[in-house]
Structure formats: C-alpha cells, structure tokens
Image: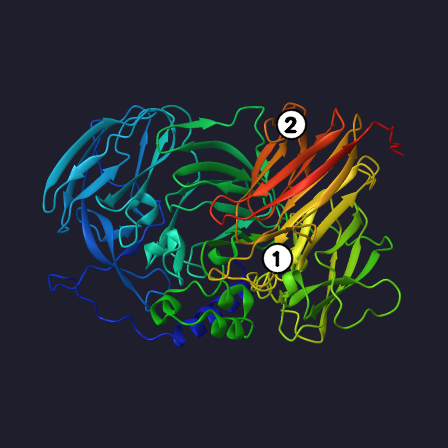
Amino acid sequence: MTAPSAVLLSSLLISIGAGVANAPHRVDASGRTPPRVTANDDRRPAGTMRDGRLELRLDIVNAQWFPEAEDGPSVTMQAFAEEGHAPEIPGPMLRVPEGTEISVTLHNSLDVEVVVHGLHIRPATTDDAVKILAGATRQVSFQAGAPGTYFYWARMTAAPFNYRSKDSQLSGAIVVDPRTGPPRKDRVFVIGVYRDDPDSLAGRTPHPREIVVANGKSWPYTEQFTFTAGDTVSWRVINVSGAPHPMHLHGFYFNVERSGTELVDSSIVPSAISQANTRVILPLSTMAIRFLPDRPGNWLFHCHFALHVDGKGTLRNMIDRRPWETMDREHVAMNHGVHEMAGLIIGIHVLPRGEQLAASTENPQRLRLLIQSSPYGYSHKPAMGFVLQQGAEPKSDSVTLPGPTLFLERGRPARITVVNRLKTPTSVHWHGLEIESYPDGVAGWSGMANRIAPMIQPNDSFIAEFTPPRAGTFIYHSHMNELMQTNSGMYGALIVTDSAHSFNPRIDKIILVGGGGPGNIEVRSAGMVNGTASPQLELEAGNTYRLHIIQIHPQFVVLFRLGTDSTTARWTPVAKDGADLPPEQATSRAAFVTMGPGETGEYLFTPEQPGLQRLSIQTRLAGWQVPVMIIVKPAKKIATN
C-alpha cells in the first residue's frame, strides 16, 4: 500500500472505531469469561510434524469473537482452539504434503454434543462424521490423500448445516500439497456467515440479520493485499457458510484452476468454463483461482450479493436491531468504500511497475448519462434509473427501466459524464471492464494515493474516462446501497463492439435480469427481465441468434433453462463475463445455466422448428420466476451485415 493510501485508510478506520463503544465484558453459562478469538489468516499450519506424521490437539470451546474492530462489539461463539493457542476463527489450518498421516485429538469443552465432519482421507464418497459427547475426547487418524483444497466443520447435533448460528464458525481449512515440486505461494480464505436468528433462513421470522466474514473478519477489517503490477496471485477460497456467494473481482479476470467439495477436489477440465470475473461458489465447496493484476490502483474481490457487502450488515446493527428504513436514510451519509460497505470484501492495492502508458489522444466517444428518480417505476414503486441524454435535456422525472443499453467501441476512449439528479449520493461501476482504477466506481476506494474517486453528490457529476480493451457483454450499475438503488432500476447493459464483434438487433438479443423495485431482505424484490414481468422474444426457425444473458439482480442466484415443458434445447456458449471462450469450451450443450449477480454470458441458439419455447428464469429460494416466451416463426433468412 502506498503511504497516502495507508494514511487514508487508517484515518477512516480510526473514525469508525471512535464511534463504537468498547466491547462489553461477557461471561458464559458457567460464569467464566470466554477466551478471546484470534482471527486466523490461514498462514500458519497447525500441529506438530513428527517423523512425517502430523499431530494436532483441538478443543471446541466458547469464545468471544470480534468480527469487526478488535475494540468493537463482540459475540460469544463456539470456536476451535489448538492446544497452547487462543481459539481461532476460522479454525486452525491443517496443511500437509500428500500422503501425510494425520492424527487429531478432539476435546469437547461444551456442555452439548458436537458432530465434527471432514477429518478423513480424500477423495472420499462419504463423510465419516465424528460425534463427541459433552466433555469427552476422541482421537481421529487418517491419511491426507490427494492434493487439493478441503475443510472440516462441526455443528450441534440438533442443528442442520444451513441453520447453524452460534456454531456457524466451527470450520477450518485443510490443504494437501503435492508431494513433489516447489511449495505453492498462495493464500487461503474461509468464508463464514453468522446469523443471530437461524429461523430467518426459512422465512419464519421477518428480520434476518447476518454478518459475512473472510478469515474471521468483516470489511473493512479483513486483510488487505498489496501487489506490484504483473505479479501472479494464487488464492484458495473455501465456502463453509451455508449460502452461495457470487465472487466478483474488480478490474481483472481470474482463472479457476481447481474446484471441489468437502469430499473431492480436482483440476478444471479443458471443456469447463474457467475464466471469469464473477463466479458463484456454492455452500460446502472450494475453488482455487489465479489472476494477474496488471494495472495499478485500488481494487476489490467481494461477494456480489448486496446484503453481503452492505454496511447494514454489521454486528452493531445486529445487536441494536435497527430498522432498515433508518439505516437507508443514514446509508448514504457515510464514506462509501470504507464506512458504508461491510462484509465479504477483500481489498487489493496494486503498485505500478515501471512507466505507465500515456493516455490516448484519439477523439473520445462522449456520452452524458443522467441518474434520475421517478415516482412510478417497476410495479408502481418509486424508481431510480438512468437516462442517456440525446439532444435536449430529458424531463427531470424520467427514467429508462432498465437503463439504456450503452454501446462502446473496443480501443476507443470513452468519456461518460454521469450527472446525479437524485437527492442522495451515488456511484456507477462499469462491471467487468478492465479499465483504470479511478473510474471503476467504488466511491472512497477506487483510484490510488491522493486521487481517490468521490461519491457523486446530488446535483453534481463525475466524468468516467476509460478505454475498453476488449469487446463483449458487460454491465453498468450503482455500487452504493444496491438494495435500494440497483433494485430500483440503476442498472443496464453495456455492449463493447469491434470489427469481429458487431451487434445486429435482429440476431443479437439482450436478456437482462434485474430487480423489480426497491427492496431489502424484508421485502424481497421479484425479478424483471428487460424491464417487464412478461417478456417475449420473436425468433425465426433456422436462424442462429446470439443471446446476451445478463444477471444483475442484487439478491439472488438465478437459474436459466431454455426449451419446452418436456425438453431442454441446446445452445453453444461463446463468451463468459465479456471474454470470448476458447474453442474447446465453446461447445454445444444443454441450454441450462446458473448465474449470480454480476455474471454475463453469450450463447448461440438456433431454433429448429416453428412453435413456442420458453426461457425459464427463476430462483430456488425466493420462489419467483419470469418466463420469457419465445415465439418461433417459420424460417426467413436474416441478413447478418
């Protein structure tokens, strides 16, 4: 981190800590003060190696956890503790070479039975769970098995995995390295979610609150990383949280090299889509990624669910049970990048290496994008949205829902003047574009040193200047209070073209999934597709179409399936998150895909017969669906030029 950036961040963190009372003195049911949790950065392998055998003694204890500032609020949780060390969240990391014998002695200091999963050889077909009675000790021995990223976790006997609460942080990483070759220089992140009210998962309570952490801490207290442009970064991500997380990397693409579960881990096969800037990691799964940060500035790697990066998701708000409406009013009064965001976020600082490229002198493409509000949006709810000014000034209460599709040219500078006509500050993120940090759109964070991007204040403007380096399908959306702003209509498609990637409205069809009005976790916003709940497409049999599917609903993972009631059609994916797929991945397959917020894809689809088909768009948890009716007419040749 450069010195000015460090000073900026330090001053912001000090101002946060100044407003929080010292942590309360807590005692457990026995009257003892629980030991303090240490946030585990997963760099120190636990245990002792003796003659090629790892020996580890673990205790399961009550402990006082500080998921944010070390002098901030805390909560008493169950945690793993290695003998001779403080309790850790996540639990102590087991990292050994392939083939190592592992012996773990488990003691349960709690007054209830605990079931521990994951202490077994890999690959495996079943998990050999270990039950430990209150006050009891068990010993488990197993061989490390095949190289990969794995984990162990525990729960109370009566609590299913998805309903863990006080025991939700009972988990830890297991990394098995290859027996030969140089040690891999990587970092490990364990994702955790704490809910004070597990019944809210099933919708039985109206006010669910949760804290999302990486290696035991919530942003802005998560570890931050400093690289030099051109460094190679290797990370392992383990999701033991019970919820999916669409992980988004600002500014760069990453390659998924391996993925797995608690039982098995394997390399990505050549036909699998491995390059992305957003990818959903499912519960009880892992992924190993590698990326090359080649442009200096401040960047983020974060979950793209609004609730998992929203400043309302703090322990103080959980303790105080503050109304959502109150927090909405306060939300935009704080510095966005550090004060306002909280949750599953990892900060990245990239330092320059050598001389920087000079700015292009080519005449830029100039756009004027207005952000306005209207009393009538989706479902007659108030709307916040974009208007692209073309000619005279648009009416002050007009919005385009969703935002107008922006067309830019690869390699040509763009100069977009964003004018904020709202009553609250905002920002705009050009999602997926490999651009400079300053216009990236995270107010109070994007940029570097003494040039940090501000919030766009009411009646003010911001000029985003950048040059798109590749053609593809991208998104632009609010990066502030997304439960309100993005859900209310502040999102749109962004298409970058070049000589090899033209856009013909007759064959290029945008399918944009977004929110349907202001919403939060208490008022779940249903989805809209291209701004309506009853979209239609008219296609012609025998012609090949390019479907540009964009998912930017900030609350849900969405399932797409194309076909009839009884059959699933076939399509060919040709791009993911704006990047063209290599030939071995661009192959015909069943027309089914799952996308989290922030993911895009391009699919070639040729309807063979006239008739009706349906692109089903739905969620599993929320229960809403929006079917896109596809009317296939008799064949008529489409000119592609």
Residue 358 shown left or right of residue 261 in the figure:
right
Decide which of tag 1 and tag 2 comes sooner along the chain: 1
Residue 207 shown left or right of residue 476 in the figure:
left
Task: Residue 81: give x, y in percent of width and height.
Answer: 21, 48
Q: 298 or 547, which is in the foreground?
A: 547
Neighbours of disc 2 within 10 Å: few (<14), some (14-19), many (20+): many
Q: 252 or 564, which is in the foreground?
A: 564
Q: Residue at x 60, y 65 (%)?
A: 443
Q: Amino acid at mark 1?
A: Gly
Quadrant showing the C terminus: top right
Task: Residue 481: give x, y in percent of width and height.
Answer: 56, 64
Quarter holding residue 115 = top left
Is disc 1 placed on a helix, strand or loop? loop
Contact flag, marks 1 and 2 (Cβ < 8 Å): no
Q: Residue at x 48, y 58 (%)?
A: 307
Quarter holding residue 48 = top left
From where the camera sits, is residue 434 visible?
Answer: no
Name the disc covering residue 167, or none: none
Is disc 2 placed on a helix, strand or loop? loop
Residue 130 shown left or right of residue 628 in the figure:
left
Q: Which residue is mark 1?
A: 516
Label 1, label 2: how many angstroms apart (C-alpha)? 28 Å
Task: Residue 611: give x, y in percent of width and height.
Answer: 73, 30
Q: 561 or 163, which is in the foreground?
A: 561
Q: Residue at x 80, y 28 (%)?
A: 543
Q: Which residue is mark 2?
A: 569
Task: Residue 435: give x, y in percent of width and height.
Answer: 68, 51
Total numbered labels placed on residues in the image: 2
Q: Please, is residue 438 above or below residue 502 in the view?
A: below
The colour scheme used here is rainbow
